[in-house]
Amino acid sequence: MTGAGLLDAVAGQLEWQRGLYRHFHRHPELSLAEHGTAERIEAELTGLGLDVQRIGGTGVVTVLENGAGPTVLARADIDALPVTEATALEYASTVEGVMHACGHDLHLVALLGAVRLLAGHRDAWSGTYIAVFQPAEENAAGAQAMLDDGLVDRIPRPDVALAQHVMPAEAGTIGTAAGPVLSAGDSLRITVYGRGAHGSMPHTAVDPVVLAASIVLRLQTIVSRETEPGQFAVVTVGASNAGSKSNIIPDRAELLVNLRTYDTTVRESIIASIERIVRGECAAAGSPQDPVFEYYDQFPLTGNDETTNDTVTRALRGHFGDGALFEATPATASEDFSRLPDAFGIPYAYWFVGSVPSETYRAAVAAGTVSSAIPANHSPFFAPAIDPTLEIATRAQTVAALAYLAVR
């Protein structure tokens, strides 16, 4: 059988995949708590006669060895978000306050579909296929948890890594690009200190509320005045918290800051600028204690290797046709997939799969309302169209693998 013959089998397993997708969507689980999800993934894989490993707590890995040839790692994330679903779908979340609002349920079912195709048609390919079902992408902990649990030493060394993500683009389309496709992301908690006092006696205090306000204003100059025009950077102060009563000057304030970059040098420069500005404003205010910087939810850059992206793009174009592919623009969202290939020192490709019904998407484009009318990832209304998105994602995952593994 050829790779094309293998792909003919997709239609015959779609009903199984649709039912599985609805199951996972109804039963979402938060990062590092994906116990039921992992158990169901294991059951599906062992039902195919495959061996599985638990790596990283709720991470699941299976290795399909099928003779000589390249080794391909394919990854899907499996965690949900603390979002209350508002889609009114028949298969909406049954877990209060938790929802698959980013499409990870579709990712994992597409990867299960690719595994089933490859396991059932071994005459069409040769090499090794590693399917990684990764937990905790949403808080940037899952890839590292798998690495900390010995992933590198517990599976064959891959030659290339692959991943995909559903996005609010037209269903039936696939976006690829070389270079950065997702930004690096860093969150930090900054605590600055003052000297508390009665609100009627401000001369006896060092007011951390005023200090925090000065910092917020000055941080806005990092992008506008310190970053070279044309370089991408975002600095956001998402929260400023201090005090509890109108007539009490508190002794400290807390800022929650987020930054996004596409370039490591720019990232390091911005972090240095944030710390310099905060320390400078604290000194100017007479703060009695040095500020504290706590970094968390740190996501690496996702930047596609040019050769790998070209190989995958050619394979996808050959299967889906020119009209289905588009040049993806870098997104400002972030994710932790790249930690896995980086740990092995191997190239990777990451692409986007559209999930909005064509009629809906094209109407929004015509009206100029795409950003307002179409729910984006993490929205309580986010709902990928099962058809054709699930089939397209399954085919894309399989086609990309066959670009390396197909028997020629």
Image (cartoon, grey):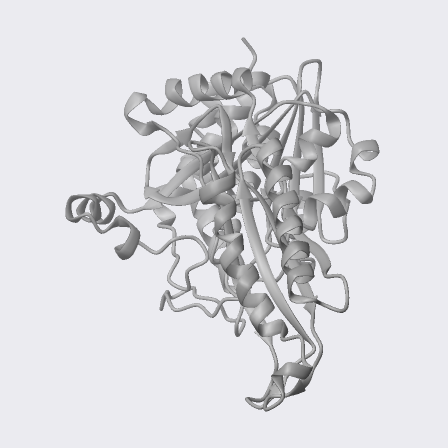
Across the whole image, how many numbered discs are drawn on residues?
A: 0
Query: Relative to residue 277, is residue 176 drawn left or right?
Result: left
| Depicted 108 relative to depicted 400: above or below | below
Looking at the rendering, in which quadrant would you find the C terminus?
Answer: top right
Residue shown at 50% from the left, 71% from the top:
94
Query: Looking at this view, is 11 or 75 the one in front?
Result: 75
Q: Position of residue 138 (x, y in %)?
A: 59, 53
| Depicted 3 relative to depicted 353: above or below | above
Q: Which residue is farthest top?
A: 408
Residue shown at 84% from the left, 32% from the top:
153
| Depicted 75 relative to depicted 385: above or below | above
**In which image quadrant can residue 196 be found?**
bottom right
Query: Relative to residue 312, is residue 291 drawn left or right?
Result: right
Query: Relative to residue 57, is residue 119 drawn left or right?
Result: left
Q: Position of residue 338 (x, y in %)?
A: 63, 35
- Is residue 300 in view from this perspective? yes
Residue shown at 54% from the left, 71% from the top:
95
Query: Relative to residue 189, is residue 81 drawn left or right?
Result: left
**In which image quadrant can residue 294 be found?**
bottom right
Q: Position of residue 5 (x, y in %)?
A: 45, 21
Q: Position of residue 230 (x, y in %)?
A: 42, 31
Query: Looking at this view, is 39 or 265 the one in front?
Result: 265
| Depicted 384 relative to depicted 269: above or below | below
- Is residue 135 in view from this perspective? no
Query: Looking at this view, is 363 or 387 the one in front?
Result: 363
